[in-house]
Image (tube, rainbow, N blue to C red):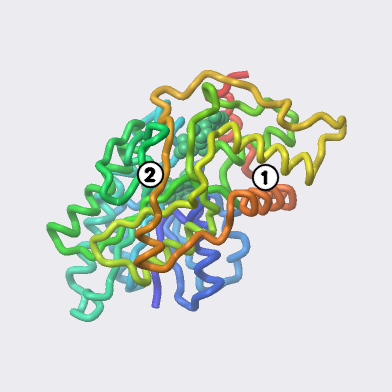
Amino acid sequence: MTILVTGCAGFIGSNFVQTWLSSSNEAVVNLDKLTYAGNLANLDALKDDPGHIFIRGDIGDRSLVSKLLAEHQPRAVLNFAAESHVDRSIHGPGDFIETNVVGTFNLLESVRAFWQDLPPAEKEAFRFLHVSTDEVYGTLSPFDPPFAETKNYEPNSPYSASKAASDHLVRAWHHTYGLPVLTTNCSNNYGPYHFPEKLIPLVLLNALAGKPLPIYGDGQQVRDWLYVEDHCRAIARVLEAGKVGETYNIGGWNEKPNLEVVNTLCAVLDELKPRLDGIRYAEQITYVKDRPGHDRRYAIDARKIERDLGWKPQETFETGIRKTVQWYLTNQAWVEGVTSGAYRQWVGKQYGA
Ligand code: NAD
Ligand code: TYD
């Protein structure tokens, strides 16, 4: 049997394929456009694995996707592909609409055409799993309850609005056409292969390079943090046992203000790779202009997936962050590969000189 996954040269997808193939004989066809965020080095460990078939292409390319579906006959399609960075969505929302909204629409149409013609038993067993974010729910005040699956959508950034639109399309393709869909909404991930435009890898690499650690606004914005392998296990579990048409919120019960995240990271670095001059990494913290429309707090109520599917995160923030720091310290070649070219241009645009 085979599954078709999209966007798996990116951060979460590449972790997912590796986790999947380490515990399953089921092959993975990986369709990825290789945007700036897609990196084949994330998949180096699978170079000689016959269970991993990489295809470069766009989820919006209906003829390519239809050809892949016909050729590989997957029993499920998992959609990780997206433009995923809030700050980039503020600078240029067009790509987010193109991939997250129009791309998801085209993917749904290709999958629907394939699924409709399957024999009854395969049609019944087929799944379309859409990977989404907690950001679709909007922002919380300090004493609001965390996001449950019943929370109304109130997206505030071009990124979250485009993901919300894609979630709605997935829902509609189930209700209207009967496509057997599952949707997951997860909180902020961190871990290996995380592109250093996002907070944790950016701070980690800037710290080691002796550069400022940029904190937007007052640094008191709260996110829930989940170690990426825990997210990958949750997705596999939803695919295995999730109820068709349902959504599952995935989170780590790790609500933390950004400043605390950065201080924890600095403390782990002080221990594992202290600065030669004895100064603490936290001294590099620098407050910068806040992100426009910055959501104040996200928090996930993960009781549904815990209760119905028996999933629980295995890492605490403290164990996960330590593993993450260790991974970046021992994977210098990967770090050098991603911190060149297009990435440098982005840093110049976002943070100036
Ligand atoms: P990422 O930006 O690291 O990777 C995205 C991947 O998608 C890249 O490999 C890119 O080349 C590919 N891609 C982009 N447009 C494409 C297209 N049109 N066709 C095919 N491939 C395309 O993103 P990520 O952090 O790994 O996130 C993966 C998914 O998980 C996204 O849907 C994101 O919204 C969701 N998510 C992310 C987080 C997080 O904390 N990173 C949290 C919750 C949900
Ligand atoms: P990010 O990693 O971009 O994820 P998201 O915006 O999807 O939550 O940012 C996480 C938090 O860190 C968010 O509140 C913005 C903040 N942040 C900074 O303070 N400084 C930075 O340089 C970056 C990239 C993010």
334 or 23: nearer the eye?
23
Left or right of residue 321: residue 98: left
Image coords of residue 299 (percent x, y): 42, 43
Which dot marks residue 171? none
Which residue is at 56% across, 43% downward? 195
Above or below, comparing residue 201 to residue 229 in the picture = above
* Residue 247, picture quadrant: bottom left
Nearest to the observer: residue 67 or residue 3:
3
From this viewpoint, which residue is outermost toward the left?
176
Task: Answer whether residue 62 is visible to the viewer in this image.
Answer: yes
Residue type for callout 1: Val
Upstream in the sequence, badge 1 or badge 2?
2
> Percent x, y for residue 56?
45, 55
Q: Residue at x 22, y 81 (%)?
A: 121
Q: Nearer the viewer, mark 1 or mark 2?
A: 2
Q: Which residue is mark 2?
A: 146
260 relative to 170, above or below: above
User: Can see residue 346?
Assistant: no
Give the label on residue 335, or none: 1
Give yes or no for contact between labels 1 and 2 (Cβ–Cβ under 8 Å): no
The residue lying furthest to the front in this view is 143
Crowd band around label 2 with a 10 angstrom C-alpha radius: few (<14), some (14–19), many (20+) = some
Secondary structure found at label 2: loop
